[in-house]
Image: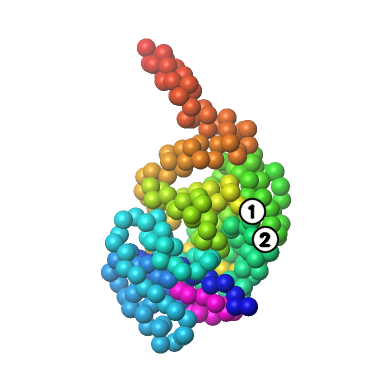
Amino acid sequence: MPQPLVSICIPTYNGAAYVDEAMESALKQDYPNVEIVVSDDGSLDDTVAIVESFRVKTSIPIHVYIHTPSGIGANWNHCVKKAKGEFIKFLFQDDVLYHNCISEQMAWMQRDAEVGLVYCKRDFLYAPSEREGLDAFMAYYGDLQQYWGSFTEVAGIREGRQYLGDRQFLNSPKNKVGEPTVVLLRKAVFERVGYFDTELEQTLDCEFWYRVMSQYKVGFIDAPLAGFRLHQAQASNVNKTRDLPDRTLLYQRYYQKLFWYLHPKCQWKLLKLYHPFFKALVNFKRQFYAT
């Protein structure tokens, strides 16, 4: 029986510096049935030309779509919508997949039809010249799974709602799963829970992972199967200097969409932030102490 098709989705924008490494890693997968779907957000460099140059090197289908820029989430969604596979494997233009990434993740995905998301650990990639200042970041964000409070994450499959019900859910780091490159998704999840939230710019990945968890089981592989690149020009680094809407919107999304799955401690925090009664009480206290 042929293996299900996996779409390797690569949203791009001005990625000429590293996209060749990403493409090479996609083509070296030992999983036998993949396509590569690139959605480019109007790159001004050689990104598209570099991707196109790989067509002569492989029989793997490579589809390139030009997307009218309208935000990072819109490009991610466009990439998914163009994919023909039953499963979606994200690969970002700066990152790489190890040769067995898809085969290992698919093995876990196919163990249980109720699994909607499988994720793994990752290594950090960086140039030696850019190592300065990264040690603290890597120490804190290297092992994201240690930050769950109600359980110890181990390799296997667990109910997604167990993550949402964790007492540390709202605490830092906000993303306790990882970046899109570490995730494999069943494409059907997009029909059930919707697509990436285009109003979010920095936290749209974890907001989506947690929505998936509300409806599906989750598989975890306790091994690095991908490399996540750290460099000065990456979006997450650039966004540190911007006043993003995520700081307000993320918790609002949790209140609107995930409230009833959360730990009582987290529910109480969100109630105080967003329930009309508590908002009115806060406003009253401000006015009282201002007079």
Q: On the picture, is 260 further left or further right than 241?
A: right
Q: Which residue type does callout 1 highlight? A: Lys
Q: Is residue 31 magenta?
A: yes
Circle nearer the viewer, 2 or 1: 2
| Span shown in magenta | 24-36
In percent of width and height, residue 233 lies at 39, 62
Q: Is residue 205 above or below residue 264?
A: below
Q: Could you say which disc has been placed on residue 217 in the image?
A: 1
Q: Could one spot residue 145 in this view of the protein?
A: no
Residue 226 lies in quadrant = bottom right
Q: Could you say which disc has been placed on residue 112 in the image?
A: 2
State yes or no: discs 2 and 1 in contact (Cβ < 8 Å): yes
Q: Is residue 181 magenta?
A: no
Q: Residue at x 46, y 51 (%)?
A: 194
In percent of width and height, residue 216 lies at 61, 52
Q: Residue at x 63, y 37 (%)?
A: 263
Query: Label 2 vs label 1: CA separation?
Result: 9 Å
Q: Residue at x 42, y 77 (%)?
A: 62
